[in-house]
Image (cartoon, grey):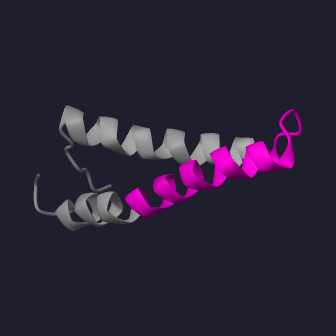
């Protein structure tokens, strides 16, 4: 098994992207808000979460096997 060490700010950034992605998806799928409200809140959260995942994933995966 390979291990990767993350700093606390990096871990917080990864958790934040997961929260934004999940919250956006939940808003898009929820039935309690109007369609207009869901899309106005859900898509930006979902897209920000998805877009910020790529650079963070590259950062973490780029460290594998380097000891840090």
In depth, the one of 13 and 41 nearer the eye is 41
Task: Choose top left, top right, bottom left or bottom right for residue 6.
Answer: top left
Query: What residue is at 63 percent from the left and 55 percent from the top?
Result: 43
Query: What residue is at 30 percent from the left and 38 percent from the top?
Result: 11
| 64 left or right of 51 in image | left
Q: Main secondary structure of the magenta part?
A: helix
Membership of 30 in magenta stretch = yes
Residue 28: give x, y in percent of width and height: 75, 49
| 38 left or right of 16 in image | right
Membership of 51 in magenta stretch = yes
Residue 41: give x, y in percent of width and height: 64, 44
Task: Choose top left, top right, bottom left or bottom right for residue 56.
Answer: bottom left
What number of labels is visible?
A: 0
| 22 left or right of 51 in image | right
Residue lying farthest right? 31
In depth, the one of 1 and 24 nearer the eye is 24
Residue 48: give x, y in percent of width and height: 47, 55
Residue 49: give x, y in percent of width and height: 49, 52
Task: Choose top left, top right, bottom left or bottom right for residue 61.
Answer: bottom left
Query: What residue is at 18 percent from the left and 38 percent from the top?
Result: 7
Which range of residues does the magenta coloring cover? 28-53
| 22 left or right of 18 in image | right
């Amino acid at each position: 098994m390979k291990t990767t060490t993350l700093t606390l700010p990096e871990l917080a950034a990864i958790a934040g992207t997961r929260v934004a992605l999940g919250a956006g998806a939940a808003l898009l799928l929820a039935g309690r808000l109007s369609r207009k409200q869901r899309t106005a809140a859900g898509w930006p959260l979902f897209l920000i979460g998805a877009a910020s995942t790529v650079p963070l994933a590259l950062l973490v995966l780029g460290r594998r096997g380097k000891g840090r």
